[in-house]
Amino acid sequence: MLSENNLAAVIGVEGIARLTAAFYRQIPADDLLGPMYPAEDLAGAEERLRMFLVFRFGGPQDYLQRRGHPALRMRHAPFAITEVARDRWMRLMENAIGECGFSEEVQGVLRSFLGNVATFLINRMS
């Protein structure tokens, strides 16, 4: 059964790289999320998300070796993540998921996992 724990075996590191690239292509033009991502570190942010997703979806453990425990709430604490920001992040991620043309089953796993993580990271009231 497909889950976030074995998704890398289905879509591969390349599929995860396509997803993160499709997501980050949208960031610079986004009026809400764009300012949260410094232009000089956009490639770094993309790499960190890609490595995290590869690790979390059952692929190579490069993220843990390079960055240690994800500590997502701590890493995102400096950013004002409201429900509105969470919903925008998910909208851009939905666009990226659609662009990649994954199967319905893969899309469902991605939406569920990413939606739960995005909700978990809300740290400010709207």
Image (cartoon, rainbow, N blue to C red):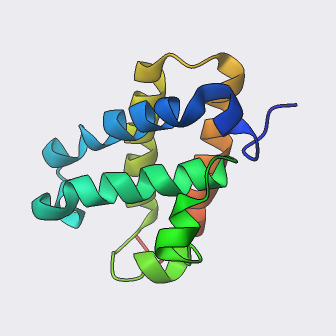
Q: In the rendering, at what x and y percent does residue 80 appear?
A: 34, 74
- The image quarter containing residue 61 is bottom right
Choose between 19 and 107: the one closer to the eye: 19
Of 59 and 82, the residue lying toward us = 59
Instruction: Give above or below for 37 relative to 79.
Output: above
Residue at image location 63% in from the left, 16% down from the top: 103
Residue at the image position 43 percent from the left and 55 percent from the top: 49
Identify the image quadrant of residue 92.
top left
Of residues 1 and 26, which is closer to you in this image?
1
Left or right placement of residue 92 versus residue 9 in this view: left
Q: Position of residue 73 (x, y in %)?
A: 53, 78
Q: Is residue 49 visible?
A: yes
Pick out the residue farthest to the right: 1
Q: Quadrant of the C terminus?
A: bottom left
In which quadrant of the rendered image does the N terminus lie?
Answer: top right
Q: In the image, residue 44 lies at what x, y percent?
A: 27, 59
Count of labels in the image: 0
Does any portion of residue 118 appear in the rendered image?
no
Left of 77 or right of it: where is 73? Answer: right
Q: Residue at x 72, y 44 (%)?
A: 4
- Residue 123 image point, x, y percent: 48, 77
* Left or right of 119 in this view: 95: left
Question: As rendered, which of 44 and 36 lies closer to the eye?
Answer: 44
Residue appearing at x 36%, y 53% in the figure: 47
96 sits left or right of 25 in the view: right
